[in-house]
Image (cartoon, helix red, strand yellow):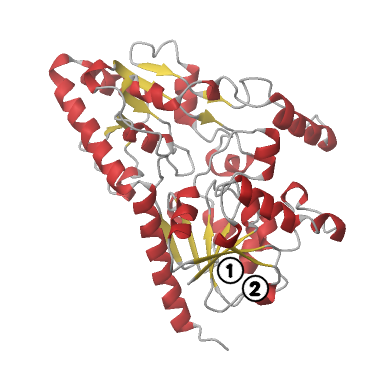
Amino acid sequence: MRIVFVNLHGNEFLVKTINKILFKQSVALKHKYFLDYLLSRDDVEVCSYINERGLSLSYKTRSRFLQSFRFLEHYFVMKKNGIPRKKIKVLKRENELRHDDLIIMYQLFGHEFDFKKRPDSFIALSQLHFSLDNASVIEQLRPDLMYNESNMQERFAGFNDYFGWFDKQYLVIPFVFAERFKVIKPFAERQNKAVSVGTVTYPLYIIKYYGTQCLQPARKQIYDNAEELKPWVDSFNSDFLADDKPYDVSNSVSPLRKKFNRIHDKFFLGRQKKYYSFDMVEKFNDYKMCVVGEEIVGLPGIGFVEGMASGCAYIGQTVGYYEDYGLKEGVHYIGYDGTLDDLKAKISYYQQPEHQQELETIAKAGCEFVRSHFNGTAAAESLLNHLLEAQQRWLAEHPKH
């Protein structure tokens, strides 16, 4: 079977891209586990279709001269990622795509959607880092399946305004913890309180639907009330616009200046240096409990899986997010209603000596569940099986012309 990615070398969720390599930026290879799994299978041929906008450092240009370097960039990036050249088959033209290919694309990367015509193949679209970017070109492409770490079709209030045409399968996949997240310190030796982690960000698109620009209000309230919460929570949250030296996002700044500020901060000042300065694995192992505030659009943060894999009893809002993965409140995690008062009450309850065994039992059950179901191999195998099942249904309904 052939699995085809588009401009694989420019997908920062799968590989360490050239800008990450050259500018030594932090890397979050959230779906690398899936690529690794595919490359490990002898019955899977992994392909990368490199289109005419495949030069990731300048994907907007259609200059033939500049874009002529896109294949060289691909080979350079694969080498830097330790992927042998023979492991990835490069497709250089649209007509090399086949009817029985399974094409996987990512919504966040607009350069992937540059087709002269819609491929006659099954297309699965990942909405990782959900946004409204590229919604119009996605509608033209009409993917056959969408997937994400939450069912945004049901969770996000504005989904139908931008993707109302989509009436096919929406697949929920789990977050996957990196292998470095593990239990290091015995539960009894940890601090008897919670640690809170995660970044607070402010995308404009949510204001219309939620009346706020804050994507993670649960993190924001902990960040803003860190001193008050000291007896119960140690906050290591980072506010993207308050920490370090943020670029000016106000309307008073010209578009050209705003773009320069973004580039300057991204490549030369860095972002959230304080937040990325500590070891997250050690931080989780210092505490018996952890909180990773959810996104208002319907997504938990990946930190909840990382904290549970490190042996913390996770505290999350009882809004149904975690049940989508098979977790149960009071068994695998501690539920609260999203208010600071209830957060304090729940932590205070489990801080009591007579409830320490109950707390440890929840932490252990959550850790075992996550390590069994949210590891890279299990999650990748499940995802591939679901994609292949959906593709087989599509092939039956769309015989080759």
Q: Is residue 156 visible?
A: no
On the image, numbered disc 1 is attached to which residue? Answer: 142
The amino acid type, in three-letter code, at marker 2 is Arg
**Residue lying farthest to the bottom in this orientation:** 401
Determine the secondary structure under disc 2. loop
Determine the secondary structure under disc 1. loop
- In the image, 370 versus 9, the foreground residue is 9
Vertical placement of residue 284 versus 104, above or below: above
The C terminus sits in image quarter: bottom right
Q: How many marks?
A: 2
Query: Which residue sits at x=44%, y=61%?
Result: 170
- In the image, 171 versus 209, the foreground residue is 171
Q: Quadrant of residue 125?
A: bottom right
Q: Look at the numbered discs 1 and 2 and tell me whether their residues touch, using CB distance below 8 Å.
A: yes
Q: What is the number of the mark on residue 334?
A: none
Query: Which residue sits at x=62%, y=74%?
Result: 97
- In the image, 72 versus 204, the foreground residue is 72
**Residue lying farthest to the left in this orientation:** 354
Q: What is the number of the mark on residue 118?
A: 2
| Residue 228, position as x, y percentages in the image | 41, 11
Query: Which residue sits at x=65%, y=39%?
Result: 20
Q: Local crowd at mark 1 within 10 Å, few (<14), some, or many (≥20)?
A: some
| Residue 353, position as x, y percentages in the image | 16, 15
On the rendered structure, is 307 left or right of 77? left
Vertical placement of residue 132 versus 115, above or below: above
Query: Which residue sits at x=49%, y=54%?
Result: 35
| Residue 74, position as x, y percentages in the image | 68, 54
The amino acid type, in three-letter code, at marker 1 is Arg
